[in-house]
Amino acid sequence: MKKYQPKISVIIPVYGVEKYIRQCLESVINQTYKNLEIIVVNDGTKDNSMKIVEEYLSDERIKIINKENGGISSARNKGIEEVTGEYISFVDSDDYLEKDLYEKIVLNLNAEDILVFNFNEFNDKENKKKKIKVKKIKKLSKGYMFYKNTYYACWNKIYKTKYIEEKKLDLI
């Protein structure tokens, strides 16, 4: 019997990140969990970020959406309009993921609308970025709001697509 493997739509907004986008994309593409849809939203970047993204288009999981610059929230919301997966995850284009992040997440999915996971954050002055990884997972069930000690960012959570659609959530 085959294990349940929901499709996860990963939304990556891109603006001015040519220094980081390669490491970000490789960390998503090379996940041990493969049932991913990778939505790259070009938020009108003027640097070489999208030229770098185009190098990865041989991976059929990658879809590019181009839009005028409207900011990171606008780019995320545009990405939400295009998802086909059962779950949505956000990765900022200057971040990178532990290689088995989505595999660990899927093992912990049940009926939750939102699942929260931890991350490591590094100081840019030291030329280090956030490394998002599963250490401890909090499950947020239907009807619950975020816990007091939950970090308020969209990129350390995975969302059931139906939940975002039903609640008509916009990311600000």
Image (cartoon, grey):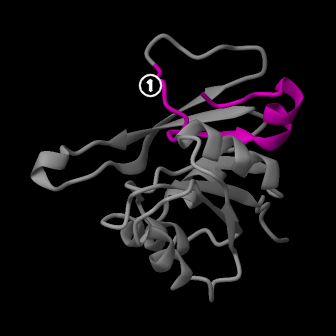
| Residue most extreme to the bottom | 58
Q: In this view, does 85 lie above or below 134?
A: below
**Which residue is located at x 37 percent, y 69 percent?**
23
* Vertical order, 77 against 86 (above or below): above
- Taking depth in this image into account, of 72 and 143 the one nearest to the observer is 72
User: In the rendered image, which quarter is residue 9 located in?
Assistant: bottom right
Residue 163 magenta: yes
Q: Give the quarter of the figure containing the C terminus.
A: top right
Segment tinted magenta in the rendering: 150-172
Residue 3 seen in this snapshot: yes
- Give the residue drawn at x 12%, y 47%: 125
Residue 11 is covered by the magenta coloring: no
Task: From the image, tell me which residue sits under label 1.
Answer: 151
Label 1 crowd bin: few (<14), some (14–19), many (20+), radius 10 Å: some
* Place of residue 134 in the rendered image (x, y in percent of width and height, measured from the top left): 45, 47
Q: Residue at (78%, 58%) from the top-left corner? A: 6
Q: Which of 29 and 56 is in front in this view?
A: 56
Q: Is mark 1 on a helix, strand or loop?
A: loop
Image-based side of 73 in relation to 36, left or right:
left
Q: In this view of the protein, which residue sits in the foreground, 105 or 16?
A: 16
Residue 37 seen in the figure: no
Q: In this view, does 97 lie above or below 32?
A: above
Give residue 67's position: percent from left, percent from top.
66, 55
Left or right, 70 with respect to 148, comes to right
